[in-house]
C-alpha cells in the first residue's frame, strides 16, 4: 500500500540527500566536530557547505542489542531529525547511542534528542 503523492512532501520526508552516505562524510564529522551528549545519546555536528542538514547514524550492537531495538532507535532518531525546524541548514550530524538507551520509552528518547539538537545548534552558531 503506497501513500498518495500529495501526502509526501519535501517538508515531511527524509530524502537520500539528507543522509551521510559514505565513510569520507562520516570521517569529516568525527574529525572536526561540536559534541553534545546526555545519558542516552551523543550528537556530533560540523558545518557543511550545503543549504540543508544531513544525518548519519552510528548505532552499535553493543549499545542497543539486537536488530529490533537498534532499528527502533534509528527510526526515532530519523523522525526527530525530520521534524527539525528549518533553522538547522548547513550542518552534518552523526548520532550515536549510549548503552541502555533502547530500554527507555519513545517519549524520553525524543525529548532527549530535542534538547540535544537545540544545544548542538547553539554550539555550532558560535
Image (tube, rainbow, N blue to C red):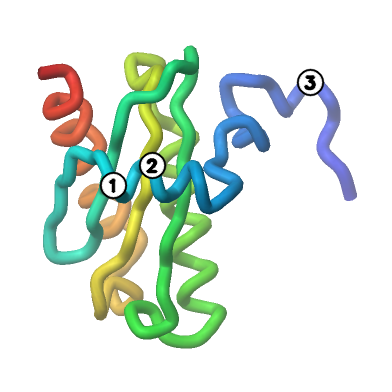
Kindly identify which residue carries mark 2: 28
Q: Which of marks 1 and 3 is nearer the N terminus?
A: 3
Identify the residue at horizontal 72%, vertical 28% (top origin): 8
Residue 19: where, in percent of width, then height? 56, 40
Which is more foreground, mark 1 or mark 3? 1
Residue 1: where, in percent of width, then height? 89, 50
| Horizontal side of residue 59 vs 1, given as left or right | left
Picture quarter containing residue 61? Answer: bottom left
Kindly identify which residue carries mark 3: 6
Kindly identify which residue carries mark 1: 31
State whether residue 115 is above or below residue 124: below
Identify the residue at horizontal 21%, vertical 64% (top origin): 40
State whether residue 99 is above or below residue 80: below
State whether residue 86 is above or below residue 34: above
Name the one closer to the observer, 13 or 51: 51
The reply to whether the C-beta atoms of the residues labelled 1 and 3 are less than 8 Å apart is no
Identify the residue at horizontal 79%, vertical 20% (top origin): 6
Residue 53: where, in percent of width, then height? 44, 27
Name the one closer to the observer, 110 or 27: 27
- CA separation in Å, label 2 and label 3: 36 Å
Residue 20: where, in percent of width, then height? 53, 43
Amino acid at each position: 500500500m503506497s501513500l498518495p503523492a500529495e501526502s509526501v512532501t519535501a517538508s515531511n520526508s527524509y530524502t537520500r540527500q539528507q543522509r551521510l552516505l559514505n565513510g569520507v562524510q562520516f570521517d569529516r564529522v568525527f574529525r572536526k566536530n561540536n559534541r553534545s551528549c546526555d545519558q542516552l545519546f551523543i550528537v556530533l555536528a560540523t558545518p557543511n557547505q550545503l543549504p540543508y542538514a544531513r544525518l548519519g547514524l552510528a548505532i552499535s550492537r553493543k549499545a542497543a542489542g539486537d536488530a529490533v531495538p537498534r532499528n527502533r532507535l534509528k527510526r526515532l532518531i530519523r523522525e526527530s531529525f525530520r521534524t527539525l525546524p528549518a533553522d538547522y541548514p548547513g550542518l552534518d550530524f552523526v548520532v550515536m547511542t549510549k548503552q541502555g538507551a533502547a530500554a527507555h520509552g519513545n517519549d524520553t528518547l525524543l525529548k532527549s534528542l530535542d534538547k540535544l539538537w537545540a544545544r548542538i545548534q547553539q554550539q555550532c552558531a558560535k
